[in-house]
């Protein structure tokens, strides 16, 4: 079948057979050629029916083979099939109608049958080629696209798109002020032309002007809605609502692009926060697990060191070695305890028992505990407390831990021979506790960095410490519904705690 369709000789034979079939069918089914010797012939209707069916089959096969050529898989239009349909119809239709006219004229003249036969062949061929060309155009999907009307419309549309894209491109690259100036200038020019056209027809001018104002109002309302959506979305994102999404449907293109950018920023922030939280959780879990794993063997080491001490080892330098191991073991134990406590405080996995607590008494007791240690470090604790007690709702045990960490840091890192100031006062229904001291090392670090875990003001790390004290104090303060902030001014180090007074 495929070879038959692609064979042009066979296609030509089929066209000829269709012509002969059509001619015989017309002759047998009418009395058109009676004067040429055929006469009145009675033909059985079955023969005429068979010829009609055969003609239709040949016509369908020819239409099916149109556009198929040997060695080519797809339908291939020829030169005539690429001519715009209107031009092809005009030329072929003119030939067809001209041949019909000649045929009628020659029949009236009663000329020879040969001339009429050739005219009939021309009429048939012009009709069959037109049908084949239309079949090829339909199969190649060019029946509508290969028309002058479509080409004209497509050209106008493409030109409009190019002009529109150019205007939008240059307009969008202008600043907002220049855009507004261009819009105002365009509206002014339009109003001037409107006035010149309809200055003698005030009724028409008013109608057109009201239409213009309505159109401007609709555009303004659209931009106002877009501005409100973006403003509301920006506020939500600024508040930390990472699930908020600005609706872009119905917004002008520029605002829709801005809304999409804000939504993408919000998604990126949400992903970054999720990733950071996951990372923090993994680090906290790692610290907790490692601390617990170290705690068991460390306890055994400390217990065995205590047993060795009870043996009253006096041999030198063995006694010194035992003392060093004991001291470092205690230091390691405190580090493990600090790690566990920092992990619990940062995750909130800690028991809090809130109760009314006298802040003056608790702070005075904490300072009393560190008086001797401060004197040994060459420091003086200068405490300033109000006359009346100041009560807050807190957990005394955890708040004691905060004071303990801050006083311990002051004793470790203060310049010997200076004072450590501890002040308690009331400001706008807030209890303000201030710790101030002069650092013995240069504080070339920001307060935010100093509040992070494992960060110490002593960058040389000559002093003992884990770098967790301030972080633990901040976490516990937040758990107790308080606020802790650091201030650094040269070598002056200040910690400020704030709690609500009840």
Image (spheres, helix red, strand yellow):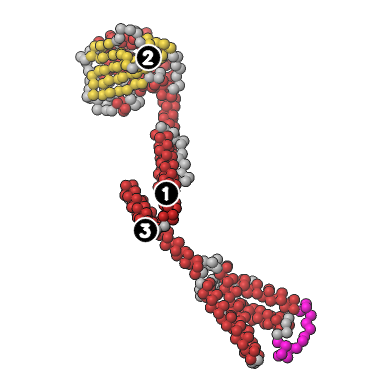
Position of the N terminus by quadrant:
bottom right
Query: Residue 467 location in percent, x, y?
Result: 33, 23
Asked whether the viewer can see residue 428, the reply is yes
Mark 3 or mark 2, earlier in chain: 3
Residue pictured at 35% horizontal, 51% vertical: 183
Marks 1 and 2: in contact by CB < 8 Å? no
Residue pictured at 37% horizontal, 14% vertical: 501
Query: Residue 479 location in percent, x, y?
Result: 41, 20
The foreground one among 61 and 318 is 61
Tell me if mark 3 has few (under 14), some (14-19) or many (20+) residues whose alpha carbon lies within 10 angstroms of its own.
few
Mark 1 or mark 3, earlier in chain: 3
Q: Secondary structure at mark 1?
A: helix
Residue at the disc numbered 1: 213
Residue pictured at 40% horizontal, 35% vertical: 235
Is 179 rendered above or below residue 104? above
Q: Is residue 452 left or right of residue 66?
A: left
Is 37 rendered above or below residue 430? below
Residue 146 is inside the magenta segment: no
Q: Is residue 249 left or right of residue 14?
A: left
Residue at the disc numbered 3: 196
Residue pictured at 55% horizontal, 79% vertical: 94
Q: Is residue 365 left or right of residue 145?
A: left
Query: Magenta stretch?
Result: 33-47
Residue 427: which quarter of the image? top left
Residue at the disc numbered 2: 501
Query: Residue 120 location in percent, x, y?
Result: 63, 84
Task: Tell me how far mark 1 sits from mark 3, CA to CA.
Answer: 18 Å
Q: Secondary structure at mark 3?
A: helix
């Amino acid at each position: 079948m495929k070879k038959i369709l692609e064979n042009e000789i066979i296609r030509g034979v089929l066209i000829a057979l269709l012509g002969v079939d059509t001619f015989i069918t017309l002759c047998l089914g009418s009395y058109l050629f009676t004067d040429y010797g055929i006469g009145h012939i009675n033909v059985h209707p079955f023969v005429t029916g068979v010829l009609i069916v055969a003609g239709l089959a040949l016509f369908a096969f020819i239409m099916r083979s149109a556009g198929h050529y040997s060695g080519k898989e797809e339908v291939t239009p020829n030169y005539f099939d690429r001519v715009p349909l209107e031009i092809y119809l005009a030329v072929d239709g003119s030939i067809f109608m001209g041949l019909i006219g000649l045929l009628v004229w020659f029949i009236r003249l009663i000329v020879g049958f040969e001339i009429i036969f050739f005219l009939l062949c021309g009429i048939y061929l012009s009709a069959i080629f037109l049908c084949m060309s239309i079949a090829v155009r339909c199969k190649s999907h060019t029946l509508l696209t290969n028309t002058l009307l479509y080409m004209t419309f497509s050209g106008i549309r493409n030109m409009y798109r190019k002009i529109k894209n150019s205007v939008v491109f240059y307009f969008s690259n202008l600043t907002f002020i220049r855009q507004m100036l261009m819009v105002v200038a365009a509206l002014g020019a339009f109003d001037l032309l409107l006035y010149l056209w309809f200055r003698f027809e005030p009724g028409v001018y008013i109608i057109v002007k009201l239409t213009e104002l309505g159109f401007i109002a609709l555009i303004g309302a659209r931009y106002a809605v877009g501005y409100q959506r973006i403003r509301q979305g920006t506020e939500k994102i600024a508040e930390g609502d990472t699930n908020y999404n600005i609706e872009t449907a119905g917004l002008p293109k520029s605002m829709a692009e801005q809304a999409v950018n804000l939504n993408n920023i919000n998604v990126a922030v949400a992903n970054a926060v999720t990733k950071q939280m996951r990372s923090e959780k993994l680090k906290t879990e790692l610290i907790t697990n490692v601390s617990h794993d170290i705690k068991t063997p460390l306890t055994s080491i400390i217990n065995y060191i205590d047993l060795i001490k009870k043996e009253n080892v006096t041999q030198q330098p063995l006694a010194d070695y035992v003392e060093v191991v004991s001291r470092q073991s205690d230091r390691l134990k405190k580090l493990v305890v600090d790690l566990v406590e920092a992990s619990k405080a940062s995750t909130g996995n800690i028991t809090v028992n809130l109760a009314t607590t006298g802040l003056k008494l608790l702070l005075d007791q904490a300072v009393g505990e560190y008086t001797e240690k401060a004197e040994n470090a060459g420091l003086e604790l200068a405490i300033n407390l109000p006359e009346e007690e100041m009560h807050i709702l807190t957990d005394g045990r955890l708040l004691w831990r905060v004071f303990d960490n801050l006083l311990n840091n002051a004793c470790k890192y203060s310049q010997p021979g200076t004072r450590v100031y501890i002040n308690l006062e009331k400001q706008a229904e807030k209890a303000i506790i201030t710790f101030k001291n002069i650092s013995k090392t240069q504080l070339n670090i920001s307060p935010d960095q100093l509040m992070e875990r494992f960060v110490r003001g002593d960058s040389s790390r000559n002093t003992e410490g884990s770098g967790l004290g301030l972080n633990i104090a901040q976490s516990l303060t937040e758990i107790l519904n308080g606020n802790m902030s650091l201030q650094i001014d040269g070598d002056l180090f200040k910690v400020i705690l704030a709690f609500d007074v009840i």
